[in-house]
Image: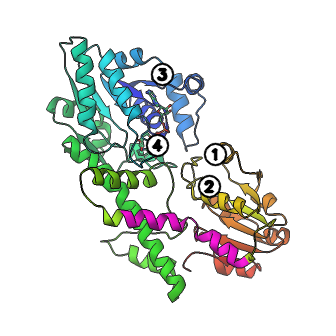
Amino acid sequence: MKITVIGTGYVGLVTGTCLAELGNDVLCMDVDKKKIENLKKGIIPIYEPDLETLAQKNISAKKLKFTTNGEEAIEFGEVVFSAVGTPENKDHRADLKYVKLVAETFGKYANAYKVYVNKSTVPVKTGEICEKIIRKEFLKRKIKFDFDLVSNPEFLREGRAIKDTFNPDRIVIGTKSSHAKEIMGTLYKPLTDKGIELISTDIKTAEIIKYASNAMLATKISFINEIANFCEKAGGNIKVIAKTLGLDKRIGPHFLHAGIGYGGSCLPKDVKALIQTGKDLKYNFKLLKAVDEINKTQKEIIFHKLKKELKTLKNKHIAIWGLSFKPKTDDMREAPSITIIQKLHQEKAKIFAYDPEATNQAKKILKNIPVTYGKTPIEIAKNADALLLLTEWEEFSSIDFQKLKSVMKNPLILDGRNFLKKNILKNFGIKHIGIGI
Ligand code: NAD
């Protein structure tokens, strides 16, 4: 099929690349000129395992192309995906300005029947808003042909986005048109042929599924963090508790790792946006308000533990391992490291940081805070009064801990992800403080 993808962020670029790999002709469009110039040359703007290889392969094969021209992009595809950002507004609602702009561009330039697919995470009833915008443009142009609207929310996880796109747990297609459903069914046939379930529903249900899914994940994290905080008062080991809970098939093992809270571009904003949509519809999401509140305080827990250990942080050398909101991505959006670094800076600590992939993103986001970025985890720990592990990158488990102990001024690790083994570190003479263990 001929496919257009509008927006070449984490979702759009991965979707475009994977659809090209499945044999479609894909044209990706973005308003970011620099990004598109680079993408045309095969330069990928984000770190995502396997994305570069797969994108370059399909660019060379001319299955994957890029443009900044909205008219060309809309005319190209039989199916047009909108995968633009829906960031958090000042009032915590999802900002729909990019989504609305894409609908308007579609309405202005569609030159034949097409399926308009919304892949971005959008509040319930956004489909109706987009449909109105498109119809208004069609009316202005006195268009005779029609279009169909589909909600096809995205569930990929950064760090394993390619794997998730080829092997999703499910595909959701929300539409009132049986023709559009058929076209989407054909597009996703290579995946449904492998046994992946396609849930066919109405647009509103599809829109709510995405928020419900992220709200559930956030709830699991805040839940286990509450139990971890309780363990600190009561005694008990959260790792053993979480593992045991996870063995119960009704609960499952995922998203039950206690730590410094959830971050990233999705869970924080989506939980808050759902609460606001509830408010707009006169529904009070009591549970989700607590989930959000717990997460806010959880991000600061490691800072308070550090202060308790060192008393004052003024001029203390604090080393930080890991900046991205989770491993295998360079995404710094809403990363707990930002909150913690801001607090360390307020207390006049000297901050040294290392991340295998996110340093460039961190430099942009933390440009007003003096942070010394190192090239190795050991380098930044030299003379450190404490080390904070904030992202569980695999390489931190195989550090030469003897060397680490010898370079640190005070061998103390505050492990915000309960990633390192207390007993092993104890053998090296390093004090380990985790969360709820
Ligand atoms: P992103 O910020 O990484 O990318 C958005 C892209 O859209 C940018 O490149 C931007 O330049 C482009 N853009 C903005 N306005 C445009 C316009 N009018 N025309 C063309 N391009 C335009 O966002 P993302 O992380 O890819 O997320 C996109 C959507 O998918 C969001 O709604 C998000 O909540 C949702 N989502 C994200 C993830 C994730 O892990 N990142 C997972 C599932 C769902």
Q: Which comes sooner in the sequence, label 3 or label 4?
A: 3
Classify residue 128 by image quadrant: top left
Indicate left or right for 275 with 321 as reference. left
Which callout, 4 or 1, points at the residue further toward the start of the chain? Answer: 4
Q: Are marks 2 and 1 in contact (CB under 8 Å)?
A: yes
Whether residue 255 is visible here, answered yes or no, is no
Tell me where residue 159 appears, x and y as whole percent. 52, 49
Q: Residue at x 43, y 54 (%)?
A: 267
Q: Main secondary structure of the magenta part?
A: helix
Find disc 3 in the rendering and name its residue. 65
Which residue matches tag 4? 162
Dot 4 alpha-carbon crowd within 10 angstroms: few under 14, some 14 to 19, many 20 or more: many
> Is 342 above or below relative to 111?
below
The amino acid type, in three-letter code, at marker 1 is: Ile
Give the mark toward the camera: 4 or 1: 1
Q: Magenta residues, as a range?
A: 289-309
Please name the residue that numbered disc 1 is placed on.
365
Q: Which of these two is toward me, 41 or 11?
A: 11
- Judging depth in this view, the residue of 395 and 95 nearest the camera is 95
Query: What residue did someone put label 2 on?
Result: 338
Q: CA distance from mark 3 to mark 4?
A: 18 Å
- Measure the C-alpha gap from mark 2 to mark 1: 8 Å
The amino acid pointed to by label 4 is Ile
Q: In the image, what residue type sits under mark 3?
A: Lys
